[in-house]
Image (tube, helix red, strand yellow):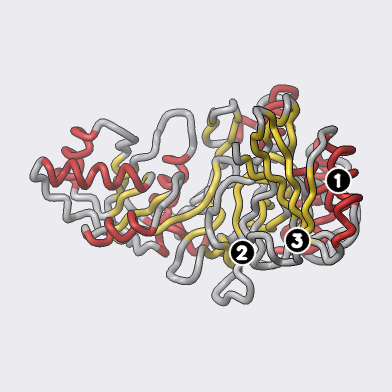
Amino acid sequence: MIADPDLDRDARAGNPLERLNAQLARMRADQPFWADLPDAPLDSLADLARLPVLRKSDLVAMQAQAAPFGGLAGSPVGHLRRLFVSPGPIFDPEGRGPDWWGSAAALRAAGVQPGDVILNTFSYHLTPAAFIFEAGAEALGCPVIPSGPGNTADQMTAIGQYRPRVYVGVPDFLKILLDKADEGGIDRTCLEIGMVTGAALPDSLRAELAGRGVAVSQCYGTADLGIVAYEDGGPGMVLNDGVIVEIVRPGTGDPVADGEVGEIVVTRLDADYPLLRFATGDLSAIFAGSTGGRRIKGWMGRADQAAKVKGMFVRPEQIAAIGRGVPGCGRLRLEISRSGEQDRMHLLAEHADDSAAAPLARKLAEITRLKGSVEVVAPGSLPNDGRVIADLR
């Protein structure tokens, strides 16, 4: 029997605040890690900002201390479907049920129809990406060629024999396959749709692929969260059902205004592996005033901007602490350069009062234990790109 993805989507939908409060109650009762969550239900989704952020970088230590999932799983290991090992190592579960990762909506939005043959070039070894899309394909009723990455000769054989309409994988490998087919005189005109993720898709590459007959769509997700957002023909990416997304100032858990670039923080409403305010380390922004569902601008780089200066690490959370220590600050950016064979730090700070430079310099030295120069700039003048530390060396 083919699972109905609409039924599963409906099961993940509903009132997000009600579902969040029900999940918080389960997490507090069943999982020791979350025992200190507030007893009272949240009054609004904005109240999430009062709760702590869980960073992906914390998972390695947590899972080493409490195998296998650091006390975060909501289901015992024996009830899960698959168990993955991602680089780190980080251990990720897959629960049971149709389209557990939420990829069917992304595939459907890209134009995938029941019965379409899908060439899945993500790895089927230990990591979940291939299985994320395998589950969505099954929910849609699509057969899958589990080709994995590389081995282009066998990929050509599969394309010639099975005539897949859909490519799933990273964008660069799709171009490689098209080039290989054209060089070998292999008919690859069956490939009409590309669902890509895991690497940047420049406009130039998207245009080239479209010119060669493949309409490419992107989605954004992680091995911990599944599919968070996907392209659907509107601006940026629409958020998937079953996730609550915040954009916060890098190094903090403080939400920024819609339209401002910051770190993607996701709460996943799932019984098997509930994640609360999970900081992905990726940058994006919410589209202000967008229609057709809440949207992000897609992947815009990494928020992990730690840099070593004179043998000491300087981190985004330290820059955020400097800004909190001087009232009236807007965006801050620490520029690190080399001069006279020495590391130099120069802090740019948005502030309406030039006299803020002195207290900012004191905070910079106090918090980083390093000296640097400070320049006060006009409010709104620093780029809205999420960069807190710019290493110019």
Q: Position of residue 379 (x, y in %)?
A: 76, 66
> In the image, what residue occupies the spot 34% across and 44% down?
172
Q: Position of residue 27 (x, y in %)?
A: 78, 45
Q: Residue furthest left?
A: 185
Question: In the image, is 130 to the left or to the right of 361?
Answer: left
Q: Which quadrant would residue 139 be assigned to in this image?
A: bottom left
Q: Type of residue at label 1?
A: Ala
Kindly tell me whether residue 78 is visible in this rendering: yes
Marks 3 and 2 close (CB-CB < 8 Å) = no
> In the image, what residue occupies the spot 41% across and 52% down?
201
Q: How many numbered callouts?
A: 3
Kindly identify which residue carries mark 1.
361
Kindly tell me whether residue 1 is visible in this rendering: no
Q: Type of residue at label 3?
A: Val
> In the image, what residue occupies the spot 64% across and 67% down?
259
Q: Give the CA separation, mark 2 to mark 1.
A: 48 Å
Kindly identify which residue carries mark 3.
377
Location of residue 90 with respect to 321 vertically, above or below = above
> At numbered mark 2, what does the secondary structure look like: helix, strand or loop?
loop
Q: Is disc 3 surrounded by few (<14), some (14 to 19) or many (20+) residues within 10 Å?
A: some
Q: Position of residue 171 (x, y in %)?
A: 36, 48
Q: Nearer the viewer, mark 3 or mark 2?
A: 3
Q: Type of residue at label 2?
A: Ala
Q: Give the CA separation, mark 3 to mark 2.
A: 45 Å
> At numbered mark 3, what does the secondary structure look like: helix, strand or loop?
strand
Location of residue 250 with respect to 89 vertically, above or below = below
- The disc, 3 or 2, on the residue closer to the chain's N-terminal end is 2
